[in-house]
Amino acid sequence: MATANFSRRKLLGAAGALWTAKGAWRGAAAQAPAQAKPPVHELPATAWNSFEIELPPHRYAADLLPDSAFGINMAMGPATPNREDRLKAMQQAGIKWGRQSMSWRTVEPEKGRYELEPWDGYVDLCRKYGLLLVGNLTGQNPLHDPRTPEGVEAYCNMARALVRRFRSRIQHWQIWNEPNGGSFWTGTAEQYARLLTAAGRAIHETDPQAKVLGLNMAFCDLPWAERLLKQVPPDCFDILCFHPYRPPSAPEERYDWWIIDQYVGNWHREELSENHPLAYMSFLEQTRELARVVERFGPRKPFWVTEINWNTPACPFGTQELRQSDLLVRFYVLALSSGLVEKIFPWTLADTGNRQYDMAHMVGLMRHDLAPKYAYYAHAWMARMLESKRWERNDVFGPDVYSVVFRDPSSGQRVLVAWTTRPYAYLRIQNEGGLTVCDLYGSERFVPKDPKSDRPVIAPLSESPVFVTGPGELRSQEVPNPGMQT
């Protein structure tokens, strides 16, 4: 059970100092020299917590769990100064997979010479903290143009060198980031298809056990996916990845503001109108449509969501921090209960800066100085409740009440996750021997079986999910209009 320790931010107006989470005074004397740009984690704080949640040890803290669904975008590398603090935070949050960008220009600083030594100790350090890595081979290299045959071969040579070096430690490799538009890929779908086909084959030939992650597209871009899949052999990649960002919309909503503003209004301003079908689908509806597209070209592949989050800036498309927690957990449960998505990688562990009005800075589950947001604790409790569990069934699945059951295949223990998109709703849950209800931050209460009645528990729901455990199958159903005699 969690215990909440409340403390207040201490102000020292005259000195301009702040009491940090570690209990050290940070004032003018502690700042970096005026001419030096401090590391991100040393920037002055611009947001402060008045809460702490005590997390119990994670049952699988140091274990490598290939089947785990819980990932993160690393947003760091061998040269990151506070990398071990970040890895400790990931371990405490129950994160088991890391999507690691391996910049082409960094790996190959000179033609044909690969700088791999710095990655050796880093990869081993990640594994020490129970983290398996996905190598994301991305980023322009001024030495090569991946749109040309020569550039494709250079990319394949870089991939071969990495796979040979890390074949016993990294077995998942991603081919580029968001090649369907934006600033990451300046070529066509046909040019990316050539890169994916060649690089996928090079990786499979170098390590037959390796898995190749393809598409990696921004949004659930159905037209681009179909165009690409027409041009690649089905065996050149093993896992399909996409980034279904949708701030500020909830995953269950059938209106996607982000699609309208960015995909329609920015990327395809001259081609698409605001009645584009993607904008009027929930996250799962978009994902099911993607599955239908993929199945036209062969057996469906596993889906991984390799980027997702609800950023928390004070600006358009920002999300309030408490709501970020609710939406993140709801997204996970919806994805895992769909039968389509296997793993999820939020972007990212920590904010990339301290500008509260900047969409690109407020991207993490933690603040830039690794002070946890509510979403960090919500992720940590979700991982503790659901790790080792597998989706079993959906008792209630929309349109505005959700009750999803997970089961531990070894112990038979079940966990029911429930919420509503309305301000309130009620769920009838069987009560063979009492139920334990846990919120997103670990606060628990036990609801005993009423000795005078065989009635099930009538559990109130809100937009914030709860985890329910107890004996038996935990059968549940919605109670539309409960009365005191229900």
Image (cartoon, rainbow, N blue to C red):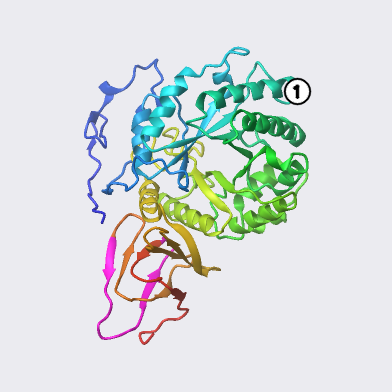
The picture quadrant where one finds residue 162 is top right
Give the labeled residue for mark 1: 149
Q: Is residue 44 visible in this depiction of the protein?
A: no
The picture quadrant where one finds residue 2 is bottom left
User: Which residue is located at x 56 percent, y 52 percent?
Assistant: 341
Residue type marked 1 = Pro
User: Which residue is located at x 31 percent, y 22 percent?
Assistant: 31
The x and y percentages for residue 252 are: 55, 60
The picture quadrant where one finds residue 90 is top left
Q: Which is more toward the observer, 214 or 186?
A: 214
Q: Quadrant of the N terminus?
A: bottom left
The x and y percentages for residue 192 are: 71, 33
User: Which residue is located at x 42 percent, y 39 percent?
Assistant: 349
Query: Helix or strand or loop: what does disc 1 sit on?
Result: helix
Bounds of the magenta segment: 444-465
The x and y percentages for residue 15 are: 23, 28
Q: Which is more toward the observer, 439 or 21?
A: 439
Vertical side of 343 occupied by 79: above or below: above
Q: Which is more toward the observer, 337 or 55?
A: 337
Q: Quadrant of the C terminus?
A: bottom left
